[in-house]
Amino acid sequence: MFRLSLGLLLALATPAPQHLSTITVRAPKATLVLQVARTERERELGLMSVTKLAPHTGMLFVFGQDAPVEFWMKDTLIPLDMVFIGADGRVRTIASDVPVVPPNTPDDAIPRRAASAKYVIELAAGEAARDGLATGTVLVGL
């Protein structure tokens, strides 16, 4: 009879972080290395299952046009900063320290963060401020 350890079963049941191409973006106090999520599926998976982000790393979500977008923290395991950016590379708004939601939270009860954006960057909570990001900041390299 074949037996799997509990650890192996959990590893098999947990989705792996995405392996996407990266881009470097210049912020006022750091160079950010960001995985690029361009497709609907890549954006949907986002940073699910990620348990830690190194300093100055995260994910860049790219949308087809500058328009209203909405983000939530479903199945996200770490608190994040969400940086909403216009097509001109200018930061429009930052949702700082967005908390993790308990896994049993119904979808309609998960808080959303929304703004008009062409790009959204997700970083570990507190990273946006450490990297000098604020409303009006222009990012180079998008």
Image: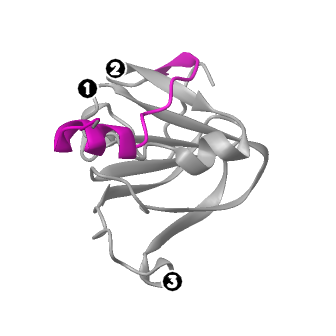
Residue 142: quarter of image: top right
Q: Which residue is mark 3?
A: 108
SS type, badge 2: strand
| Identity of the residue furthest to the front in this view | 1
Q: Position of residue 116 (x, y in %)?
A: 67, 59
Amino acid on which the number 3 mark rests in the picture: Asp
Number of numbered callouts drawn: 3
Q: Which residue is mark 1?
A: 55
Give the label on residue 134, or none: none
Residue 4 belongs to the span the image colors magenta: yes
How far apart are labels 2 and 3 at the CA level?
36 Å
Label 1 with label 2: CB-CB less than 8 Å: yes
Highlighted magenta segment, given as a residue range: 2-26
Q: Position of residue 105 (x, y in %)?
A: 36, 78
Q: Residues within 10 Å of mark 2 (few under 14, many from 20)?
A: some
Amino acid on which the number 1 mark rests in the picture: Pro
Q: Which residue is mark 2?
A: 30
Amino acid on which the number 2 mark rests in the picture: Ala
Q: Position of residue 136 (x, y in %)?
A: 51, 44
